[in-house]
Image: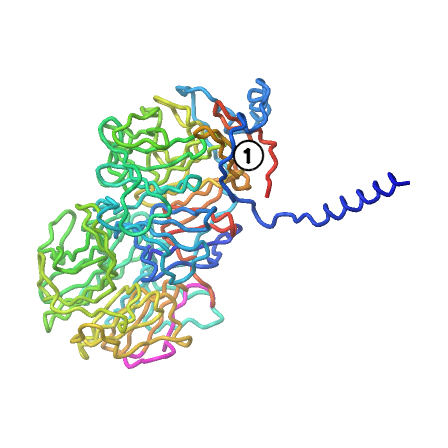
Amino acid sequence: MNTPQIAVFARLAKENTTPVRALEGQKTRISRTMHALAYDSIHDEIVVNSPLAQAVLFFRGAANGEEPPVRVIQGPHTLIQGTDYDGNDKMTFDEVHGEIIIPVAGPKVLVFSRESNGDVAPLRVLAGPDTQIRGSVRGHPLVGVDPTNNLLIVGSTGGQGGGRDGDASEGGRGRGALVIFDRTASGNAKPLRVIQGPNTAFGGVGQIQTYPPKGWIIAGVLGGGIGAWSIHDSGDAAPRWKIPVRQISSSAQTGIQSVARHIDCHRRQGGHRRQRWPERSSDVLLARNLRISKFPSSCQEGMTPRSGAKCPSSVPLLL
Amino acid sequence: MRSAIFAAALLIATTLCLSTVKRPIGSPRLVSVEELADYNEICPPEPASHNRSMIAALEENNLFAAFTETSVRAEGDTADVTRPPVRTIKDTYPIYSSVAVDPLRDEVVLQDTNLFGIKIFSRLENTPSDVEAAKPKRVIQGPKTLNEYNNGLYIDPKTGNIHTVAMDTADSMLVFPGGADGDVAPIRKLNTPHRNFATAANEEKGEIYITIQYPPKVMVYRKEANADEKPLRVLEGPHTLLYDTHGIALDVKRNLMFVGTWGNASDHKVAGTGRFYPPSINVYPLDASGDTAPLRVIQGPKTQLDWAGGMKLDPDTQEIYVANDVGNSILVFRETDAGNVAPSRIIKGSKTGLNHPAGISIDTMNKEFWVSNMGNSSATCYSLKANGDAAPVRTIRSAPVGRQSVKFGKPQAVAYDSKREQYLVPN
């Protein structure tokens, strides 16, 4: 915890495996409280916030040691604003559309182009009372993006934030909600759907991940562990499944990464966009305090649960 | 005849073609996103029954079969997935964030920020190379201790009380009695702001200092402060030049306070105020409070400061010792230094055994200093006169020789590099 390295491990790493490389040192400009990061497989870059410096950093995918970022988003025009407790620690990356999505104090959700560099204004700002985005007392809302189904998911946690579940009363984590927007929503836009209620049990995790081919929203559940909802869920929807995880420290910070396989396609603005997805059986990586765990999914490849453009799972990968 | 030749040629060509098709190496990944012409449905249409039949086929042992296209209000119980992980990346060895030597009791105290323990060794421990790990005299560890991500460390010379800064999830400073052992409750728990890091004490005035990384500040409490007691004073504000505060050292004879910073700056109350400054050691009056500017600043490329962690003062020589983590070195400055100055001594090199040094402690009684190495579960001891590539005089090692740390202790996110088949883990 003392030093905010980004350690990199081989896929088959296990207990006590030494990292193959690490990003660290003053020149990297990384700072404590990195509660989100992403890998851009199209452009081979690492994207991560520098939470104490209101900045977003881009590194070469193979970056190692004390290597400076290739681009930095930082400055007055960015509108990036952290909180005293969380800094600006949250982020999600849409590699299909090349956009970085950052929740900030306000609460607001800012969207930047991945090509941004320096003191640049966001492409879109989503904020306002109609959005139902609430953030938390000490931190930000969580964000996830489904680029295939064109959805932006905002975890409006309420409560204390910082991974503390709090209570289920008004203002506590029990009031958490998954607010689903059109991916390009901006201004004071209303959500498409809201998953909220006593059965939802959303909370306690610092990241939201999606698995577009199956329409999963993977996020934290109260009491520890992670759960999955459908992008079609609304109202007081309980998670479809959850992986309970033993809580190690007094707060339940957890990060999630789904490592998915699929080829998918969908219509977009009159044209078509073809996406090739990672070919790795749908594993779930879980970062929880002192350890990273990988859980297998027994799920076979299914279909995209989205009307209008479905792809059979038998479409071969063309690589 | 011609058709036979053509068929043979076609067969050879096909065979050659197939034999030269390269199988993909590694894991396929998202390699392109392409705008295509509007061919209506780009994907082959599916029979209406396809979705239903496929889901039905997958229902056995399929957690996700219930996902459907329609909006739903879920009913019934959530399925618990209780299978164990197939692999877990974690470090099972100690990661020593801080060290304090207690020459009066001949003990060395090490903060294990990985396993949430405090390990106490004999000051004269020197782990032989054929021993896997040194055996501590005592270990303070367990749920009653409330220890989490323990870092900053101070030993009361009179009582032997151990003051430990729980630097993240616990947001507190815990005090254990001298001689404490096992799963024991602290005798005091002082609640502090989030992101506390290091501590130092002024025994003459009965005050204890705690640095807060962000929003950056130095808190000064009564040494016996407990629970929600307020600080006596706080050093914070734009004139302090505190940016991502880390180590702290005090010179009570000359009334000086030395504070290390990493340079990551922003005002969380104002959007877009983020800046990066060079790292520094700021020098303040010992009783500085409020928005007090430093008396002088040690800063610049000659300093070689690189994620500097613990700092300690040798009161006899007025030298500041700095554990320079990523520099893999110990930097020694004169306390009168200012500006872009080179250290007067640098302990660095392959013989030193330094491996991500993060904590440091001075033993003026025995003319030695100790360093905790986060990178290899060890603490190394040197003469106070050491310089250059100096070998340690003793080493406490809690992992096999050559063992390297996993370099994370508290991951809160993870990403997958599909090009290299690697996990990215920020600490």
Residue B153 sits in quarter: bottom left
> Seen from this angle, which residue lies furthest top?
B48
The amino acid at mark 1 is Ser
Q: Is residue A131 left or right of residue B426?
A: left
CA neighbours of label 1 inside 10 A, class few (<14), some (14 to 19), many (20+): some
Quadrant where the image shows the N terminus of chain B:
top right
Residue A159 sits in quarter: top left
| Closest to the observer, B188 or A217 | A217
- What element does badge 1 sit on? loop
Instruction: Using the image, name the chain to which the residue with label 1 belongs.
Output: A
Residue A98 sits in quarter: top left
* Residue behind mark 1: A298
At which x and y percent is residue B281? 21, 67
The magenta span reads B383-401
At which x and y percent is residue A219? 39, 35
Q: Is residue A228 left or right of residue B194?
A: right
Residue at 23% x, 49% y is B171
At which x and y percent is residue A182? 36, 29
Does the magenta-highlighted stretch encompass residue B397?
yes
| Closest to the observer, A204 or B118 | A204
Q: Is residue A112 left or right of residue B351?
A: left
> Seen from this angle, which residue lies furthest front?
B2
- The vertical placement of A189 against A90, above or below, is above
| Closest to the observer, A111 or B240 | A111
At which x and y percent is residue A112? 33, 43
Does the magenta-highlighted stretch encompass residue A120?
no
| Closest to the observer, B244 or A180 | A180
